[in-house]
Image: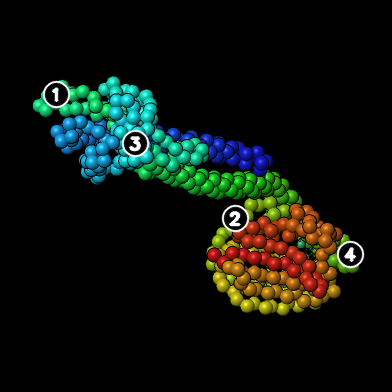
Amino acid sequence: MINTNNREHVKPFKLVKYFSLTSLFVILLGTLILSSLITRRAQSVLLKKSKDYAALMAENLNHQIFVQFILPTALQFGRIQLRNKVQFERLDKVVRNTLHSFKVEMVNIYDLRNIISYSFNEKLVGRKGLGGINYQQAVNGKSSFRMIRTGQFWEMMIGIPKETKLCTYTPLRAERPLSVIKGPILGVMEIVQDLSEDSKTIARFQLLISLISALVMGMLFVVLRYVVKHGEEIIERRAQERLELKERLSHAERLATVGKMVAGISHEIRNPLGIISSTAELLKQRLNTFDPKNRLPDVIIQETDRLNRIITDFLSFARPKIPDLMPCRVDEVLEKNLTFLEPELERQRVKIKKDYRDIPEIQADPHLLYQAFLNILINAMQSMPGGGTIHIDIFTYDKRLNIAFNDEGPGIDEEVLQKIGEPFFTTKEKGTGLGFAIVKNIVQAHRGSVKIENRERRGARVLVSLPLN
Ligand SMILES: Nc1ncnc2c1ncn2[C@@H]1O[C@H](COP(=O)(O)OP(=O)(O)OP(=O)(O)O)[C@@H](O)[C@H]1O
Ligand SMILES: [Mg+2]
């Protein structure tokens, strides 16, 4: 019963769990894709800017070389000859002055036979055929670019190469003053820029976004798992509580039905019982005159009394207990019990020993408590047919008012202990087995608890525990 009930409620949570896990992966994947798209876009913007920048730089360099080197050198020497040290150094000065504030790693100038005639790296000067296809395009008047990415295999895999370089190839032209028509091509310039740092910054940024989103997702998931687990526990508890409530309700319903039945029948039985009892009383008086020793009417009177008591017990057990709560002192209730029982206690030579430590007023129904204590005290008395002492202790513990009844009877066997409180369970010849069931009903109606156990040395102990507020 509990299980099916639980399953019903746990199911939606399973669904939540499933959705949360899936959506988590979807969001994570989405974030990764988005961050890689953003990075790609950033990389391409960086490339475009670098290309524009390089084109401008090349144009400027072309101009400076032409004005500050080619023209004066041609005038002075008659022809350009970079093998001439003076000319080479002059060009070197012009190039380095023009580019000194730009981040340029390398400049090569090729002549029209694809031979490097000027380079930052002097070892390259004189080498032939290094320009490749980009050189060919530039010789034909078309600028072009080449990316160089180098690094370890794994660096390339995660998209963070060690070095990223942009090589710009552009024709070196003669200029015609005051004309828009471009002059003839004199050679090819190769400008190499190092973009490693910018590119790495962007890649690191992507890595950071991915890591942070994974971390946030992970944390979200943990929180969600916690919430779901907590929710499940609450639901499980609720289901358990509902089940208990249902059981208590059906128990109360059963009792109410039995109660109505018993109330109806007992009314019908009590009337003839009363007539039998009073008739026996009359019979006794008449018999007394000529047969005073005859005990038969007494037997009838005793047994009708017993029947009457059984019916009363039935009624009080079967009637649902709704306590009429009011400020109440248990010692006062007990005093009434003891006054009522006094003749019987005396007859059976049972003494009462009280140990009342702390008796705060509680909210309770004194009539119901009276009934409960009476049943407990009668059981204790009945357990000591040869006499003895009943110790009654009252004390507060753990926000509860406790009333303990200790007798000096034989105590209780294990199998009997299990069954005490079950309606109609009795070990007594003339018992109905309702006494302790009534006690339980009453105490539970007060949100209290009652237990019966064996005392350490001998006798039984009944502990009633009632809430203080
Ligand atoms: N103080 C006690 N010492 C030993 N046994 C006890 C004690 N109190 C209860 N019992 C056992 O528990 C059984 C059930 O008690 P309960 O009061 O419910 O019914 P009963 O006393 O047998 O009958 P009734 O109270 O209806 O007259 C008793 O028959 C007895 O065996
Ligand atoms: Mg009893």
Q: CA distance from mark 3 to mark 2?
A: 111 Å
In the rendered image, which residue does mark 4 sit on? 294
The amino acid marked with disc number 2 is: Ile
Q: Residue at x 83, y 61 (%)?
A: 414
Question: Label 4: few (<14), some or many (≥20) within 10 Å?
Answer: few
Sequence-wise, which precedes: disc 1 or disc 2? 1
Sequence-wise, which precedes: disc 3 or disc 2? 3
Q: Position of residue 47 (x, y in %)?
A: 33, 34
Sequence-wise, which precedes: disc 4 or disc 1? 1
In the rendered image, which residue does mark 1 sit on? 180
Image quarter hosting the N terminus: top right
Q: Residue at x 41, y 40 (%)?
A: 163
Image quarter hosting the C terminus: bottom right
Q: Provide the secondary structure element on which disc 4 rests.
A: loop
Q: Residue at x 49, y 40 (%)?
A: 152
| Whether the residue under disc 2 has CB within 8 Å of ligand 1 | no
The residue nearer to you, when weighing 267 against 338, is: 338
The amino acid marked with disc number 1 is: Val
The residue nearer to you, when weighing 4 against 98, is: 98
